[in-house]
Amino acid sequence: MASLKEVKGRITSVKNTSKITSAMKMVASAKLHKTQKAVECMLPYEQRLFGIMSDFLQNGVEEKIQSPFMVKRDEVKRVAIVVFSSNTSLCGAFNSNVIKAFKQLYKEYDALGKENILVYPVGKKVSEAVVKLGIKPEGSYVSLADKPSFEEATKLSDILMEKYVKKEVDEVILLYHHFKSTSSQVLTRETYLPLTIDPAKVKSQSINYDYILEPTKEELLENMLPKVLHLKVYAVALDTNTSEHAARTIAMQTATDNAEELLQELTITYNKSRQQAITSELLDIMGGAQD
């Protein structure tokens, strides 16, 4: 059995750890509320923009538009993968899950060859994992993972759109965590380019207003498509950032709870050892008195 001094040292250590994890949980929770508000402020704009575009598409405008972003290639010879993670750890299996999913996704396109798989890592953790795998990342987007901004998202989006229009890539895939709730973050794989509209979603999101448009519907929609694509990258970055803080909140809460349980066990052990030591001392005293 460990000595009283050793047990007391462990109790002190666990108490300090509990304080740290509790503080980290509070910080993560505060950041979570902030990013949730950002998502809530952005969501109405995204829904309205998509609704307007859906109305146009529902009225058959898509048949007249020859947007390069909606053209599906007959054969995928070159692909771009944009994978989102966090910059820091201590958020449970958040980063390990997305890295594992990325490895599986990358393996699916092995036949194309390394030179035909472009990887855009958003976040320090996935960027480090990509380098360890011997893959050269296409730029660094650490700031976009830490504090998502529309400007940074637009820059990345423009790069992806330019490569797609110039036929330097035939498909662009996003891999990220979608925030559902504090306890649930869903790993999501989504095709970014070519841009496709789900008919069911179009019907549900359609606003069906009687618009007075100037210039034409076709020109407006062609200008709207890049905005939708810009907004998508920004939304995914916000989604990932919110999921990260949610995962860290849960991880730190679990760590704090475990520390409290361990503290109770150590306290019981300490009390038992102390009681045993006192009993032994009393027996020695009694034995000495009898002698």
Image (cartoon, rainbow, N blue to C red):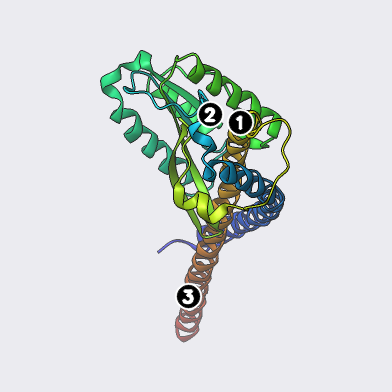
Mark 1 highlights which residue?
A: 218
- Of the residues shown, which amino acid type is indicated by label 3? Lys
Distance between mark 2 and mark 3 Cα atoms:
80 Å
Q: Which residue is mark 2?
A: 65
Could you classify mark 1 by the number of other residues whose Cα lies within 10 Å: few (under 14), some (14-19), or many (20 or more)? some
Quadrant location of residue 234? top right
Neighbourhood count class around disc 3 (C-alpha, 10 Å): few under 14, some 14–19, many 20 upward: few
Q: Is residue 232 above or below residue 193?
A: below
Instruction: Specify the amino acid type for callout 2.
Output: Ile
Which is nearer the N-term, disc 2 or disc 3? Answer: 2
Q: Is residue 211 left or right of residue 264?
A: right
Q: Nearer the viewer, residue 168 or 36?
A: 168
Count of picture labels: 3
The image quadrant where one finds the N terminus is bottom left
Q: Mark 1 or mark 3: which comes first in sequence?
A: 1
In the picture of the structure, the residue carrying the numbered disc 3 is 272
User: Could you say which is closer to the camera, residue 181 or residue 93?
Assistant: 181
Give residue 97's position: percent from left, percent from top. 41, 43
Which labelled disc corresponds to residue 284?
none
